[in-house]
Image (cartoon, rainbow, N blue to C red):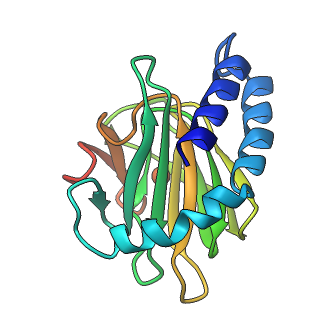
Amino acid sequence: MQNVVRSFVDDARTILAHGPTDDALAQLMARMRLLIRHPTVLEDHEAFLARSATDGSTLYADVGRKSEVLYTDETGLTLVRSRFFPDQATPVHSHGTWGVLGVYAGQDLHQSYVRRDSGSGAGTAELELIEESVLAAGDVALIPRPPQDIHQQQGYGGEPAFELVVFGKNAMVIPRLIFDVAAKTAREVIPGQG
Ligand SMILES: [Fe+2]
């Protein structure tokens, strides 16, 4: 798995040489499409299942998901594997960074929101749901650059969804926002403490 991750990271660095432009993120989506179909990723799945079934200290647990960091470095580039549960959605949230996700097993009920007010931080936040889709294994999706990196995820069809996500920053440790869509508010939390 390490070689597969290293190869992906090397390609991601090349793609992002001039920053996370629209074109670079589109290329990264194509590269993610290859990663989630790689036989080694699928072979490593059973080992992750065993790890994510316990509260192992290497896992980041949040409402509706458990994640592990597969790669991160001083530039912030980070690759994460996440398991999204079918019985509980994540809150509507942001990550403080762009991301590209790929589903490699299960299905993900994925909702994308845009922020309609002029803010980017905590406080008043007016959101609009712009897309709801069921992402199946092999599908990829973009988490746009902040402040529009807002979404909600949940395993679909009674099964968990398993994904690889590449972020521009280490989204497992930097503050993010949790939104209350009806109340039109956002609060800042540290991942795992929200
Ligand atoms: Fe997310």
Q: Residue at x 61, y 55 (%)?
A: 112
Question: In the image, residue 40 lies at what x, y percent?
Answer: 64, 57
From this view, report whether residue 108 is shown above or below residue 147.
below
Q: Residue at x 45, y 17 (%)?
A: 75
Observer-nearest residue: 74 or 111? 74
From this view, report whether residue 67 is shown above or below residue 97.
below
Specify whether residue 180 is in view. Answer: no
Q: Residue at x 52, y 64 (%)?
A: 153
Q: Residue furthest bottom?
A: 158
Q: Residue at x 62, y 58 (%)?
A: 41
**Count of numbered marks:** 0
Q: Is residue 158 left or right of residue 85?
A: right
Question: In the image, residue 127 lies at what x, y percent?
Answer: 51, 50
Question: In the image, residue 182 lies at what x, y percent?
Answer: 40, 63
Q: Residue furthest top?
A: 18
Q: Quadrant of residue 6?
A: top right
Question: In the image, residue 114 lies at what x, y percent?
Answer: 59, 45
Q: Is residue 17 left or right of residue 62?
A: right
Q: Is residue 189 left or right of residue 3?
A: left
Observer-nearest residue: 141 or 48? 48
Q: Is residue 35 left or right of residue 6?
A: right
From this view, report whether residue 89 is shown above or below residue 32.
below
Q: Quadrant of the C terminus?
A: bottom left
Specify whether residue 81 is in view. Answer: yes
